[in-house]
Structures are given as structure tokens and as C-alpha cells.
Image (cartoon, helix red, strand yellow):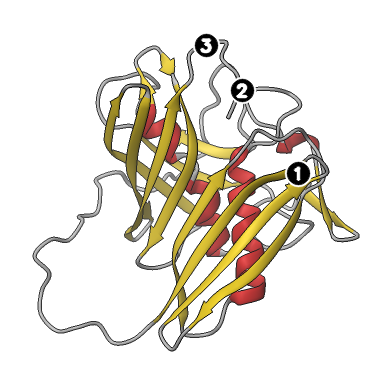
Amino acid sequence: MSSTTAFFTQKQGELVPSPHARGPWSPDMLHGRLLGGLAARALEQRHAEPGLHFARLTVDLFRNSPMLPVTVETALVRDGRRIRVADATLSTEQGVIGRASAVLLRQSEPPDGPQTLVTPAWDEPAPDGPPAEGPGWKPPFDLWRLTEWGAPGPGRAWMRERHPLVDEEAVTPFVRAALAADFASPLSNAGTDGLRFINADYTLTLARLPESDVLGIEATGHLNAAGVATGHVTLHDAAGPIGFCVVTAVANPAGLGGR
């Protein structure tokens, strides 16, 4: 990861966005992936504990947000012997823009015996060179597209964070996975003529945290009916599959407003 300008600077309890925190849809709109990253960061800083693993993160994206300072508040919902649940709320001066819920599970020895189904590693090696830049919006992260946008079949990509999320803090494996998970929507919901669905949420599930700074995302399912879609992807690191992400989305014809 580069030591260049972070997406946010922390000032008096607020997270002030940098110019490259904007998304591809409007020059005055925060990129939705960053909200999941900020929620994961706050939940990890305030509720992590050795031996407890972040197994699930659900991020609800209530509304598109202008480039305004963000605050993140968290609350411990349940703290049991093997399960901890914590929530996060993300707000700007205009109100609540999103929320998140995390489930942490106590790690232990795995049960004996083979599983009836195990997700295989995909056949895409981790990238060993710089990504190629295409036309249009330039993402503020490294992106290796393994399939062309709009091509029939499962979408595939590798990605890597280029900037810190907040100040000069290192991006942790959990935050890295939360940032990457938002890419599940364009990969699983893309049509041959572009992205015609806008995601309302995403749920990331992790068997383990990523061990490499590059993360692979492979679309593994999509369904839609009456303007409502659901899609899912498998997430990989350089060593193999690590988890899944499911998104729900609503039809968003060209020219229609946001969430």
C-alpha cells in the first residue's frame, strides 16, 4: 500500500474525506465502499478481542452521501461466550447515511472429518505487474480486470488498496476485505449494457481473514425479478478462497436517482 494521501483525515471526532474519496457516479458523492471500510475500522478498533474472529459484516447503504465529514458510532449488542455482536452507525450533518452489524465468533479446533462441499481455489494467479488503466473513471485502488465489463459469464477481478483509509493507519486485513466486498455489486449485477442495479447493502462472510494485500473477487451468482436483484461472489486471497459476499440491489435505469 502506498503512503499517499488517505481517503479520510480524522479531525475532532469526524472523518473528513479527501478528494479521491469520491465515487464514479458524481464528483460530489462519497464512494459507498468507503462506508463499509469505516464501519469495519470502528468495529475492529472498539470490539475486537484475541480469539474472536470477524465472521460476518453486513453494511446497509441508506443513501448517497455528499463529500461531507463522517462520524461513526458503535454499540455492543451481545457479548456471549462464543458470539459477540456489535453495530455501527455512520452519519453526516445531513443525518444517518448507513449502518453496519458485525458478528464475531470464538475460534477453536475444527471438527474432525471431511466436508461434503468445499469451495475450490480459482484458477487465476495473483497479479505480478501493474494494472492496466482503461478509459473512464480511474479507481483510487489497483484493479486488475480479468473479464471485460458486460462480457457474458462470471465477472472476475483482483484488487489492491493504494491509499490508507484514515490518516497514515495501515489498512488491516478485516478492513481490506470490507472495502473489497462492495465490488460484489458491479461484478454480480452487471448487464451486457452496463450496471442497471444499485446495491442497497452487502453482507460479507469470512472463514478467515485475507493473508495478502491483493484480493480476488469472482461473481458466482445473480438473480433478478420485478426490478429487485440479488448477487453473490466468492472472495480469494493469494492462498485461496476466504469467504463470500451477498448483495441486494434495486433496478436503476439510466437517469434515475440514487438510493
Q: Is residue 146 visible?
A: no
Which amino acid type is marked by label 1? Gly
The vertical placement of 254 against 240, above or below, is: above
Asked if residue 209 can be seen in this view, the reply is yes
Specify whether 71 is left or right of 186: right
Q: Which numbered disc, 3 or 1, marks the residue that appears first in the sequence?
A: 1
Looking at the rendering, which quadrant does residue 83 occupy? bottom left
In whole angstroms, how far apart are the C-alphas of marks 1 and 2?
28 Å
Disc 2: CA contacts within 10 A as few (<14), some (14-19) or many (>=20): few
Which residue position holds label 2? 137
For the residues bearing labels 1 and 2, Cβ distance under 8 angstroms: no
**Label 2: element kind:** loop
Q: How many badges with numbers are in the image?
A: 3
Residue type at the position of mark 2: Trp
| x 26%, y 21%: residue | 152
How far apart marks 3 and 1 lie (CA) works out to 27 Å
Q: Secondary structure at mark 3?
A: loop
Q: Are marks 2 and 3 in contact (CB under 8 Å)?
A: no
Q: Earlier in the sequence, mark 2 or mark 3?
A: 2
User: Dot 3 corresponds to which residue?
Assistant: 254
Could you classify mark 3 by the number of other residues whose Cα lies within 10 Å: few (under 14), some (14-19), or many (20 or more)? Answer: few
Query: Callout 3, which amino acid?
Result: Ala
From the image, state whether disc 1 or disc 2 is nearer to you: 1
Give the residue at mark 1: 95
Residue 6 is situated, as x and y percent measured from the top left of the image, at 76, 49
